[in-house]
Amino acid sequence: MTQIPGNDPTFVRCADELRAFHRGYLRSACWKAAAIMIPAVFGHVAFDAPWLIMVGIVITAAFVIIPLQTTYQQKLKSIICPHCGKQAGRVKERGFFPQRMFLSCIHCGTETATDCVTWCNGGKPEKLDPTR
Ligand SMILES: [Zn+2]
């Protein structure tokens, strides 16, 4: 959440932080998914129960993929608005692919550009070219 020092208070740098969050989450998500899917596959083979795979996929979605979205959205909402110093609470995406991400503060109503671009809502952001 550091801004460009003494430079532009209307620009929030959060891409590195958000990317690190995604990396860290996906690493643990791989282990969780494996912990769910490996027994499901074994159960499928051992008991000839193909529905176990479906159950495994549903459990993986419920406990790994959906929490990624919710924790990531919370993370986005906790980014500090540089104008009022409170958590901005809302993020908007603008433009066509890739979309630029803006903070849209629920406290002071100010929109602040970030250094993030995203290809999909809630997906791992890319860092914007710092020269732009
Ligand atoms: Zn604000």
Image: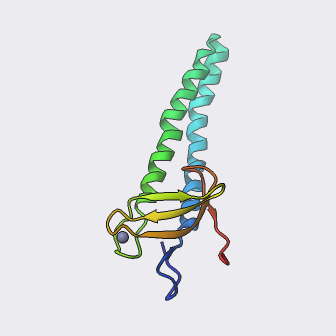
Residue found at x 68% / y 71%:
129
* Image coordinates for residue 111, horizontal then vertical, percent: 44, 68
Q: Quadrant of residue 24?
A: bottom right
| Circle count | 0
Point out residue 30 in the picture as x, y percentages from the top left corner: 61, 42
> Is 19 in front, or is 118?
118
> Which is nearer the eye, 63 or 130?
130
Query: Residue pushed farthest front?
Result: 95
On screen, residue 50 versus residue 17, left or right, reads right
The quarter of the image holding the C terminus is bottom right
Q: Among all residues in the image, which is located at the extreme left? A: 107
Query: Is 71 displayed left or right of 121 in the figure?
Result: left
Please give the name of the residue rendered at 49% of the width and 40% of the height, measured from the top-left corner: 66
Quarter occupied by residue 32:
top right
* Along the viewing direction, whichever of 5 and 40 lies nearer the viewer: 5
Q: Quadrant of ligand 1?
A: bottom left
Where 30 sits versus 83, above or below?
A: above
Q: Is residue 6 above or below residue 100?
A: below
Seen in the picture, residue 107 relative to 24 is either above or below; the reply is below
- The coloring applied to the image is rainbow
Q: Residue at x 55, y 51 (%)?
A: 25
- In this view, the residue farthest toward the bottom is 6
Residue 56 at x, y percent in the picture? 56, 26
The residue positioned 48% from the left and 34% from the top of the image is 62
Q: Is residue 114 left or right of residue 77?
A: right
